[in-house]
Image (spheres, grey):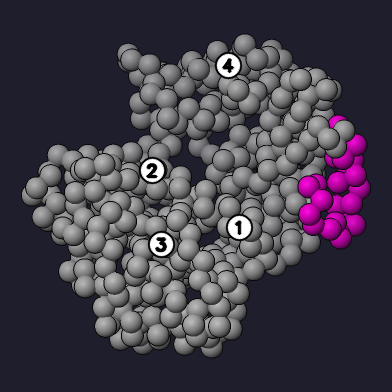
């Protein structure tokens, strides 16, 4: 039995406002584009556009093979949860659309999965192309789309480009568009795959959408500038058209329910914190200092006064568990340990200052600064790997704690990565964040996959 992946999205610039949707059918084994759909639908809400994108994607999959098993992936938690039967459909505009989507293919053949917005770029780009066309008084045309090229480059993140000259990225985009134009809204497997590979190769080695790097938990001074060639430098971008801006008003659609809110607490001070030494998950696992215990008690009182925390989850490292236990004891809760919230392992640099690490391992340290894929000396964890781990942990915890307020007690790297991803900010934004010991941040994750961030980083009252 054939298997397809459908990725769908919709947007509204105003919510309600000018709206459009995009959807793509993919081969799950190869990632090749099998069909695309996009349409400007006039004035509508974000959620209506998302449902229409789902319907179009399912119909495209049915046209390819009505007996196929389909996995639908969307960054709209509202649509995913409602179509999975876990959330009730209350809004009158959603009920007929959900019913129409359910009739396209037999229920037993379709499953749904929520994905972060950054993993739904292909469908998002198609939706924005459709809205752009509508603004010009036109309808979306497959021949003018570069969404497949952009998505191909993103999906081939881990695959090195072929050896040889970089070439002309514009020619690669033209090849994709020429191949896609011949099939109308439905793309042929061989033509699309070949063109996408050509465009991806011609984009060259710089066309990598790497995960952000960050500095050590305690190693670098807060707010210190990024190295000229390191992760603080503006990330290389796809040489095709730039991704369209997020539609205005997303995150404010109807019938989304309460968000899942992660209150992010960095642990209190240890003896290594004032010395700004590398302190990850591969070192001595230090306990809280006297100052750190005072900070933990003070933040526990602050959170008790707010009265919103329902669950406490901690990194397995001692400094986090001690901080989390102080809060949990004050709130009358228990602490759940989550391995995915641990700090990165800094390998042979554990316990060293940044200057000491540079003196002892200059080449390794420079490589680490130059690329998030580089690991610290001695088999530490790269920041690219840490970002994948933390993103997976976030997604799992969101599924387990929908609509709840959860305290996550963690470290500098995990907290900054969660905030950076929620903001959709570029990697260099990490070097503009200061995260003091025992400081609080909060991210609210909404049902449509969007998020908002609140920072509370002044810990002078904790001293």
Task: Where is residue 108? Give x, y as percent.
Answer: 83, 35
The residue indicated by pointer 4 is: 193
- Pair 2/4: label in front: 2
The residue indicated by pointer 3 is: 316
Q: Are marks 4 and 3 in contact (CB under 8 Å)?
A: no
Task: Report crowding for label 3: few under 14, some 14 to 19, many 20 or more residues within 10 A (C-alpha).
Answer: many
Q: Earlier in the sequence, mark 1 or mark 2?
A: 2
Q: Earlier in the sequence, mark 4 or mark 3?
A: 4
- The part of the chain drawn in magenta is 83-105
Instruction: Find out whether residue 118 is within the magenta segment.
Output: no
Alpha-carbon span between mark 3 and mark 1: 19 Å
In the picture, the quarter occupied by the N terminus is: top right
Alpha-carbon span between mark 4 and mark 1: 34 Å
Q: In the figure, 392 relative to 452: above or below? A: above
Q: Earlier in the sequence, mark 3 or mark 2?
A: 3
In the image, which disc is placed on residue 384?
A: 2
The residue indicated by pointer 1 is: 398
Task: Where is residue 386? Give x, y as percent.
Answer: 39, 48
Q: Earlier in the sequence, mark 4 or mark 1?
A: 4
Alpha-carbon span between mark 2 and mark 4: 27 Å
Q: Earlier in the sequence, mark 2 or mark 4?
A: 4
The image quadrant that residue 91 belongs to is bottom right
- Pair 4/1: label in front: 1
Q: In the figure, 442 relative to 449: above or below? A: below
Task: Label 4: state its secondary structure.
Answer: helix
């Amino acid at each position: 039995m054939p298997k397809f992946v459908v990725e769908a999205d919709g947007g509204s610039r105003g919510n309600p406002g000018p709206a459009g949707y995009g959807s793509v059918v993919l081969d799950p084994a190869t990632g090749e584009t099998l069909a695309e759909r996009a349409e400007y639908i006039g004035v509508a809400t974000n959620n209506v556009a998302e449902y229409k994108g789902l319907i179009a994607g399912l119909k495209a999959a049915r046209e390819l093979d009505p007996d196929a098993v389909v996995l639908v992936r969307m960054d709209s938690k509202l649509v995913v949860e409602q179509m999975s039967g876990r959330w009730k459909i209350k809004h009158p505009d959603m009920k007929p659309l959900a019913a129409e989507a359910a009739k396209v293919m037999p229920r037993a053949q379709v499953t749904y999965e929520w994905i972060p917005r950054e993993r739904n770029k292909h469908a998002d780009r198609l939706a924005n192309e459709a809205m752009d066309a509508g603004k010009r008084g036109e309808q979306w045309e497959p021949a003018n789309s570069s969404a497949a090229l952009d998505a191909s480059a993103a999906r081939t993140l881990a695959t090195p480009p072929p050896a040889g000259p970089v070439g002309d990225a514009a020619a690669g985009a033209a090849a994709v568009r020429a191949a896609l134009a011949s099939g109308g809204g439905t793309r042929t497997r061989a033509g699309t795959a070949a063109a996408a590979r050509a465009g991806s190769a011609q984009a060259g080695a710089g066309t990598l959408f790497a995960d952000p790097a960050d500095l050590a938990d305690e190693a670098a001074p807060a707010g210190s500038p990024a190295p000229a060639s390191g992760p603080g430098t503006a990330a290389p971008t796809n040489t095709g058209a730039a991704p369209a801006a997020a539609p205005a008003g997303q995150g404010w659609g109807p019938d989304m329910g309460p968000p899942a809110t992660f209150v992010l607490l960095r642990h209190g001070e240890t003896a290594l914190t004032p010395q700004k030494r590398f302190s990850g998950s591969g070192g001595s696992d230090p306990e809280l200092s006297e100052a750190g215990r005072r900070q933990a008690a003070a933040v526990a009182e602050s959170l008790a006064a707010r009265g919103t925390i329902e669950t406490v989850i901690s990194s397995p490292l001692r400094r986090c568990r001690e901080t989390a236990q102080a809060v949990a004891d004050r709130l009358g809760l228990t602490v759940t340990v989550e391995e995915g919230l641990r700090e990165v392992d800094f390998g042979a640099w554990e316990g060293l200052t940044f200057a000491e690490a540079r003196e002892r391992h200059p080449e390794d340290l420079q490589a680490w600064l130059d690329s998030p894929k580089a690991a610290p000396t001695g088999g530490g964890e790269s920041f690219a790997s840490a970002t994948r781990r933390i993103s997976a942990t976030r997604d799992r915890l969101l599924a387990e704690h929908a609509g709840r307020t959860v305290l996550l007690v963690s470290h500098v790297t995990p907290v900054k990565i969660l905030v950076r991803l929620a903001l959709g900010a570029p990697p260099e934004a990490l070097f503009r964040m200061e995260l003091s010991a025992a400081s609080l941040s909060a991210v609210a994750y909404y049902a449509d996959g969007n998020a908002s961030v609140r920072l509370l980083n002044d810990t002078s009252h904790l001293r």
